[in-house]
Image (spheres, rainbow, N blue to C red):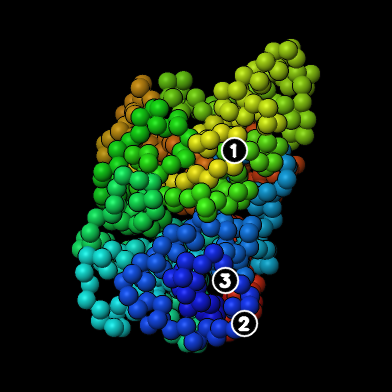
């Protein structure tokens, strides 16, 4: 990938500008913006890190030259990764958002914007993080506690970006031959001519991620502690985030002992939520479980490109008014009555949408759960009143969820995006211990997490590795529904996609309704953007997935 935008990106971050327009691009040679200027002080490096925080949630066109208002960082990537594997079910076409993704018509096209923008954003993170790392190393800058924090974040961000790239644009580590499988270009340099190299192997990318995350932890051990008390503090990465990323990397590559140990380290100081906190809407970094999240400030709202627009049934937008998002019905029916997480799903919500995919919406005449129109309307009105959407035209649908609720229901106000919480770390620990055959340790991790959600839970009932893994997979879904883990879980587990009994409509979902397992189906590997093939002299069409 050409790195012609690297220093322009850094300059824009340092200046905290709201956009970098084409006129500026044309007037300012990229080579004239030196790293020594953009990264001249620790304060400037901090601004670059703050720019990466913003890049995770801002509409990309306000930061990246050539960006698009469609793709607002994790607002989009979290929801699309769950939509693609039916972790979140769409009940109707509405205005079409994410339709190509859930039908598997987007990531399989080299020219589709979703491939380009994911690749483009992640490599900008790599480039900006590398610029800081290389500047400190080349100039032999003394590392105090402030610079140690900046370097800890830079190394963690680079590992984070490469983890996302290798998860989507290459064959999964556990289902292929990582020593020879092509990965993505490994680019850590920041000097002219900014031309990326060929595809490194999957193993080489993992080696880089492991080295980076270990460096991150080492620097965080020297750094001042992250601030506490306000949601913006958790926008910054800290040593817990680094341990959490290390746990994810290890889990995806079968390094079970490291995954379990790192997950335990990551969750220290982040206690599990109470029932009232769990049901509060997942809309703020202030929740005690949140280890890392984007704090979306009011002046940076992305309006109808936000995570809650694409995910929450209380946001006031046409996508969710016309397309209530559903919990997978097959998964819901496996949750015991004693588990309070059932309460955020409404399996008997009236189907008020005459355009619903299942052709059972609009009235009691077609909704099989109701035979009386007055009762149908009364229940629908009651639900809208309880959840703050009364009078706004929000449709309802059986199995719709209210796990994610914006803080001010019925508005378009911005809310935080949770990127990592301690519940995930318990599940990583449980899975890693189960895969090592450490049955009691896996049971203990499950009991601590699920027992806090279900007063009658008994992890001892799952006494074999196979039974434990089945239960762990269910708990990944129930606990982290809508939080973006569906796609990578399918890759790691080599799990085929089959939405039979999920509530998804096979006609609407098309190719996204059923897919063979990733190990025998290269459609799980995203296409490299055609723009990268065209621009990178080290890549040809023969290097395409």
Asked if the residue under mark 2 is in contact with the one under mark 1, i.e. CB atoms within 8 Å, the reply is no
Figure quadrant of the C terminus? bottom right
Whether residue 200 is visible here, answered yes or no, is no
Q: Could you tell me residue 410's position as x and y percent?
A: 60, 34
Dot 3: element: loop
| Left or right of residue 301, residue 500 in this image | right
- The disc at residue 403 is none
**Residue at the disc numbered 3:** 20
Quadrant of residue 49 within the rendered picture: bottom left
Residue in front for this viewpoint, 295 or 354: 295
Whether residue 353 is visible here, answered yes or no, is yes
Residue in front for this viewpoint, 391 or 179: 391
Q: Could you tell me residue 58's position as x and y percent?
A: 53, 57
- The disc at residue 26 is 2
Which residue corresponds to the image point at 34% horizontal and 39% vertical from the top-left?
A: 288
Dot 2: element: helix
What is the C-alpha distance between the residues marked 3 and 1?
30 Å
What is the C-alpha distance between the residues marked 1 and 2?
39 Å
545 to 259, vertically: above or below: below
Which residue corresponds to the image point at 44% horizontal and 50% vertical from the top-left?
A: 295
Q: Could you tell me residue 245's position as x and y percent?
A: 36, 56
**Residue at the disc numbered 1:** 411
Mark 1 or 2, nearer chain start: 2
Mark 2 or 3, nearer chain start: 3
């Amino acid at each position: 990938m050409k790195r012609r935008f690297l220093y322009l990106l850094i300059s824009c971050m340092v200046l905290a500008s709201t956009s970098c327009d084409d006129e500026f691009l044309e007037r300012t040679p990229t080579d004239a913006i030196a790293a020594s200027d953009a990264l001249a002080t620790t304060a400037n490096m901090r601004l670059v890190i703050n720019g990466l925080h913003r890049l995770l949630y801002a509409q990309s066109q306000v930061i990246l030259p050539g960006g698009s208002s469609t793709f607002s960082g994790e607002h989009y990537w979290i929801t699309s990764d769950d939509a693609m594997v039916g972790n979140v079910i769409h009940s109707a076409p509405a205005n079409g958002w994410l339709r190509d993704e859930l039908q598997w018509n987007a990531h399989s096209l080299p020219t589709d914007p979703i491939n380009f923008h994911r690749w483009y954003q992640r490599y900008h993170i790599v480039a900006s993080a590398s610029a800081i790392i290389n500047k400190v190393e080349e100039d032999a800058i003394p590392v105090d506690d402030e610079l140690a924090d900046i370097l800890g974040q830079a190394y963690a961000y680079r590992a984070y970006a490469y983890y996302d790239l290798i998860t989507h644009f290459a064959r999964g580590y556990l289902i292929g031959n990582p020593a020879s499988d092509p990965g993505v270009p490994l680019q850590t340099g920041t000097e002219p001519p900014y031309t990326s190299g060929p595809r490194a192997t999957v193993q080489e990318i993992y080696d880089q991620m492991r080295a980076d995350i270990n460096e991150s932890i080492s620097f965080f051990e020297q750094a001042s502690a992250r601030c506490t008390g306000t949601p913006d503090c958790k926008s910054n990465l800290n040593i817990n985030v680094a341990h959490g990323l290390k746990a994810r990397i290890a889990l995806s590559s079968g390094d079970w002992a490291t995954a379990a140990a790192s997950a335990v380290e990551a969750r220290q100081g982040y206690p599990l939520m109470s029932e009232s906190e769990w049901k509060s809407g997942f809309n703020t970094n202030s929740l005690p479980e949140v280890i890392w999240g984007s704090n979306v400030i009011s002046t940076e709202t992305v309006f109808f490109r936000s995570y809650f627009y694409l995910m929450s049934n209380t946001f006031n937008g046409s996508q969710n008014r016309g397309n209530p998002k559903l919990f997978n019905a097959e998964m819901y029916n496996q949750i015991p009555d004693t588990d309070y997480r059932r309460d955020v799903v409404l399996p008997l919500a009236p189907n008020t949408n005459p355009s619903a995919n299942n052709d059972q919406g609009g009235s009691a005449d077609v909704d099989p759960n109701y035979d009386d129109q007055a009762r149908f309307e009364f229940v629908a009105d009651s639900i809208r009143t309880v959840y703050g959407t009364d009078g706004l035209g929000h449709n309802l649908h059986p199995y719709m969820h209210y796990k994610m609720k914006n803080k001010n229901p019925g508005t378009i106000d911005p809310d935080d995006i949770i990127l990592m919480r301690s519940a995930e770390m318990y599940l990583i620990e449980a899975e890693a211990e189960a895969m090592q055959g450490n049955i009691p340790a896996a049971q203990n991790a499950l009991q601590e997490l699920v027992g806090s959600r279900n007063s009658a839970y008994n992890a001892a009932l799952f006494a074999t590795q196979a039974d434990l893994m089945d239960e762990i997979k269910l708990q990944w879904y129930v606990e982290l529904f809508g939080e973006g883990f569906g796609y990578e879980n399918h890759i790691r587990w080599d799990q085929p996609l089959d939405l039979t009994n999920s509530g998804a409509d096979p006609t609407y979902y098309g190719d996204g309704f059923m897919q063979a397992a990733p190990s025998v189906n290269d459609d799980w590997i995203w296409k490299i953007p055609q723009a990268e093939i065209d621009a990178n002299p080290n890549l040809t069409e023969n290097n395409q997935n």
